[in-house]
Image (cartoon, grey):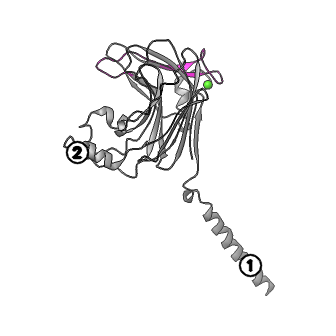
Amino acid sequence: MKRHQFIIFAIITFIFIGCDKDQNNPEEHVEESFLFEDGFETQNDLLDELFPSNGNRWSTIQQTDPTNATNEISISTTEFNEGENALRVVAYQSDSDLSKVDIEKNGLNIVSGDKVTIKANFFIVGTESIENLLLLDLECCSCWDPNVGDNYGSENQCPGVRLMMSGGNDYLSIERGKISGTTIQQTDFAFPRNQWVSVQWEMILSDNENGLNRLIINGTEVINEAGMNMPNAQVFTDAFLNQGIDFTLQEPTFYERVQIGATANPTAGNIELFVDDFSIKVE
Ligand SMILES: [Ca+2]
């Protein structure tokens, strides 16, 4: 009898342990946080080292060259903010092609209600006006209506929010044109040049006015405003209907990629900048 009791006890205990394991199944914990950080450190100063085959660093380079120049992206060993390397990009002045060169991390799954914190340090060379320079994009491409395709111009097929120089020159602001929103602008804090500058961009994501948008430069909060920061299905439907296009935003909508560098250079000149100590945290 004792042996039978022990076996029954053992079976019940086993079932409970089994249930407990099920409760710890990560798939059931949707609010589990995500962190990706990269300081662009390498062994041999090679850009390729940022793209290991196991996928645990960066995903790809985005590069569009103007007609008569080739943009540059490389590992810097002379200018860095952390460790011994940083990312260096040179985006030459745009012509009929919008010049861009940046590095991308994709495969993200950032949804409405998530708190996203993106941090990076930038070193922008020179003192020329950098009005409209874009440094950081958070985008969804899979949310685009495949039936519309590129009928609306290829620049706009990945809606999202971006950090852009605004206010006539170098006032870093939150640009929302791709989601039919206005730019959340500040003109209190000019972006320092020829030195390392820390940028922290925090959002609580929402496709309505309940979203939160916060920007901190060198420890100074320059933006703290409520507002939409994800594509809104109705806003897209209405905006396209104005042009006679039937558009259905693909849902559930999620931001799937982040890009950093000169994600677009519509300025009047060439842009050389360095990036270091990047991180994106999703909670
Ligand atoms: Ca570094």
- Of residues 182 and 273, the one nearer the viewer is 182
Label 2 SS: helix
- Of residues 220 and 127, the one nearer the viewer is 220
The picture quadrant where one finds residue 63 is top left
Q: Amino acid at mark 2?
A: Leu
The N terminus - image quarter? bottom right
Q: Which residue is mark 1?
A: 9
Q: Is residue 145 visible?
A: no
Q: Residue at x 58, y 56 (%)?
A: 26
Q: Position of residue 12 (x, y in %)?
A: 69, 76
Q: Which mark is residue 269?
A: none
Residues at marks 1 and 2 touching, judged by CB atoms closer than 8 Å: no
Q: Position of residue 27 (x, y in %)?
A: 55, 57
- Position of 119 with respect to 250 (left or right) is right
Label 1 SS: helix
Real-space CA distance between mark 1 and mark 2, rounded to the nearest whole angstrom: 66 Å
Q: Is residue 31 magenta?
A: no
Taking the image in four quarters, ligand 1 sits in the one at: top right
Highlighted range, magenta: 73-99
Q: Position of residue 136 (x, y in %)?
A: 47, 30
Q: Is residue 150 above or below residue 171?
A: below
Q: Is residue 150 above or below residue 68?
A: below
Q: Residue at x 62, y 60 (%)?
A: 24
Farthest-out residue, bottom: 1
Q: Is residue 92 magenta?
A: yes
Q: Position of residue 96 (x, y in %)?
A: 28, 19
- Disc 2 under 8 Å from ligand 1? The reply is no
Q: Residues within 10 Å of mark 1 (few under 14, many from 20)?
A: few
Principal secondary structure, stretch drawn in magenta = loop
Q: Which residue is mark 2?
A: 241
Q: Residues within 10 Å of mark 2 (few under 14, many from 20)?
A: few
Q: Amino acid at mark 1?
A: Phe
